[in-house]
Image (cartoon, helix red, strand yellow):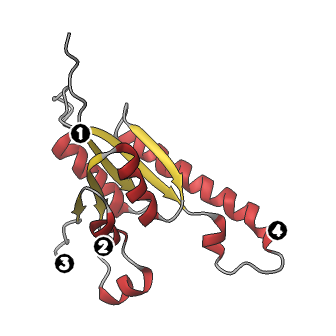
Amino acid sequence: MATAPEKPVMVVGVDESSHSFYALQWTLEHFFLPSDSDHRFKLVVVHAKPAPSSVLGLVGPGASDVIPIVEADLKKTADRVVEKAKKLCSRKSVEVLEGDARNVMCEAVETHHASVLVVGSHGYGTLKRVVLGSVSDYCTHNAQCSVMIVKRPKTKQ
């Protein structure tokens, strides 16, 4: 008896921003319709939780007192993100991986042998992208799969 081939994997990266949840919602609406019980892709939602030391930057005297507080705050944020993601996409895998979002997304692609990585766009201008870095830009150049960047439509004022 032949087994059905495994579905290709789609990884969606989420953080606490509305942009990433827009990308998740858009992905669900376009690839995972509730009326379609046999989806083309397996969905894995990934949240990158930064390490406390990366949030604190340079660690100096007294850092050992602050690290547990920062770790607790990062855990609360991760819990909120995961809970919100699970509400949007029940019965789907939601993972929290620790590390820089750029690296975490590329590692998740490799771990799950993903065919597609979906990330949201914060819509930063050139200067902010240079200063803050761009997860989507990094992933387009380093992920070992196709990368889809979902941009929130601009609202007319």
Mark 4, Cα crowd under 10 Å, few <14 / some 14-19 / many 20+, is: few
- What residue sits right under mark 1 in the picture? 8
Compute the Cα span from label 1 to label 3.
40 Å
- What residue sits right under mark 2 in the picture? 137
Can you tell which mark lies on residue 108? none
Mark 1, Cα crowd under 10 Å, few <14 / some 14-19 / many 20+, is: some
- Mark 4: which amino acid? Asp
- Indicate the quadrant where residue 140 lies: bottom left
Please report the residue visible at 42 percent of the width from the left and 50 percent of the height from the top.
46
- Mark 2: which amino acid? Asp
Closest to the camera, between mark 4 and mark 3, is 4
Image quarter where the C terminus lies is bottom left
Closest to the camera, between mark 4 and mark 1, is 1
Q: Secondary structure at mark 3?
A: loop
Can you tell which mark lies on residue 65? 4
Image coordinates of residue 154 in percent, x first then y, are 19, 72
